[in-house]
Amino acid sequence: MRTMKTKMCMLAALLLLTVQAVFSQSLSEAQKDLYYQRYQTAKKSLQQLVSSKPDAATYYYLGLADMGLDDNTAAKADFQKGLQVDPNAALNYVGMGRIAIVVDKNYTEAKQAFQKAWDLSKGRDFDVVRAILQATALSPKADAQYALDLVEQFKNDRKNRRYELTAEDYTAIGNVYSNLPDGGGKAATNFETAQSKDPKYAAAFNAEGDLWDRARQDSLALQDWNNAVAADPGYAPAFYQLGTYYRYRDLNKAQEYLNKYMALSDDPLNAKVNLVDILYLQGNFKQAVEQANDLMNQPVSAATKTRLYKLIAYSDLSEGDSLDAKKNMDTYFKLQDPDKVLPQDYKFYADVLGKLDQDSLQLVYLNKFVNTDTSTNLEFIRDEAKKLSGEQNFKAANLWYDKLFKVADTSQLSMADYYYRAFTEYGAAVKGLGSYDKALETWQAFTKRYPDQPSGLYYIGTIQKTQDTAYKGTAIPAFNKYISMLKPDELKSADKKAVLEVIYSYEAGCYATQGQEDKLNEALQKLLGVNPQSTVAANVFANQGYKAAQAKDYEKATALCNKALQINPGNSTATQVLNYIQQMKAYEAKLKKYEEAKKKSGQ
């Protein structure tokens, strides 16, 4: 009887161990699905686990799955249920901190939740520390330094000395560093340490690729994403990043990588948003809108629906429907988490506003476009500025040049940087999106720095000429100095003759307005020297003729108007003045005859 009882106890213990082993294995599989971002699969497994055995840790991971599926309401309920099962469950306090960061944007509340988790774990459980790091990395506004300080406290506790940080730990640390303004170097170091720890841990390569991508180091980002898929061909996030990278570079490659991503996804419905993206890139705008609207009517996630509004807006603008593009982008901005809005989203919206002639609002979004981009890659900044300048989007280009001057050391700036910064400032002023006064200051600074460059003087003169509506001649000194710096051969070129014609025309207008005849005649001779058919010169002579005719100096008026017609036979003012003189002469002759006849008749 005693033997039977012993056997029964042993059998029960064995059964309990088996159940625990199965539970542990199932939880491990669900954690693996979370790593691969197979959130649907993870959620299904975790729901089965909590239905059979409510467990605080399982509720935490279920909350992570729900957050991955963009169901933050369900996630919050999961974390709360975990705390109901075990009020001292540290991980679920971390989960509540996640909700505070992502949903409530309450970073103080998040920090309090993390501190509670740390205290409950007594600073001895790196699973808790890692969870805090991962939550903190979700927003650059979260207290990154606080999370990193917890890592140091953990390391400095002698009771934790046997714990060896894993690849997952180093990656979590790196992701937090990447949110600090000067944390890029330490982030990369931690990612690379993780890669050394576990060369198959694709997330470390992928995270470093994201880091380089934000810094606009394209070649390094591409290398890391390729290393990620080489380390683990089942890691879907890296395929998605590769598809996004090639989006505007190689459509075939983009489609290839996005197809691989969708094949690995356990959420085919939401993954279809990528097919809409491909249709847009192929130029099938109407089909893209049709498929997007079709997906809108299906049970897609809120994140997918938000992204669809943006894709529809892109297609709208390509089809020439700026108003509908604005409407859909307005909806996108309303729904999207501000932390997830991309710099390019602001640039696109600025383009839409430009089409609608909403200049002041366009300027607001151009500033957002530049300010939210965290790149410190000088070549990227230069390339972006040059591209925008080539598109005559001078204000956006100028904002990038301003950013270049903030990021770069003086020794890294070239004469071309100073030149194009001033040029785009001027271009923005011409388009009504900038200030001529600021453009003038920028060109004056360029000329002071590079006094041997005549181009600075040319633009100084051009701006002063634009501002000189009263023709006082304020631009003449800059123009004269500019001309004096040109080489004789340059003065003969067609391009420079066109420039000189504008300058001499302005000078002639100033001297004519001021009544300085000697200087006017000199300017007119120069003007006719570069363009013998100058309409400006013809107009000046015709106007002088008109004034002489008003003063009844018909001889001078006739000579000036004939000169105008020699230059431009179609000058209407000169023709009218000559006709007027003929009429006046005829009238005066008749009047003279009348007076003579009157005198003879003795009247």
Image: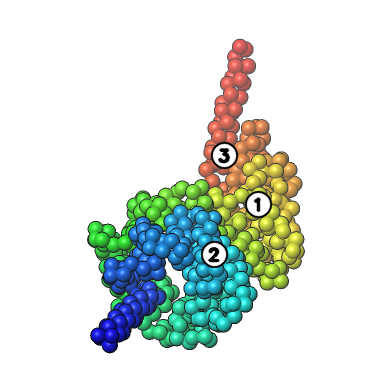
Residue ID at (72%, 44%): 517
The residue singled out by tag 2 in the image is: 119
Residue 600 image position (x, y, % from top left): 62, 17
The residue singled out by tag 3 in the image is: 578
**Disc nearest the viewer among 3 and 1:** 1
Query: Spatial distance from mark 3 to mark 2, Cα to Cα?
Result: 101 Å
Front-lying residue, 366 or 85:
85
Query: Spatial distance from mark 3 to mark 1, Cα to Cα?
Result: 47 Å
Q: Picture quarter containing residue 592?
A: top right
Q: How many tags in the picture?
A: 3
| Residue 208 drawn above or below residue 596 | below
Side of 466 where 106 appears, left or right? left
> Mark 2 is on which residue type?
Asp
**Disc nearest the viewer among 3 and 2:** 2
The tag on residue 438 is: 1
Q: Quadrant of the C terminus?
A: top right
Q: Earlier in the sequence, mark 3 or mark 2?
A: 2
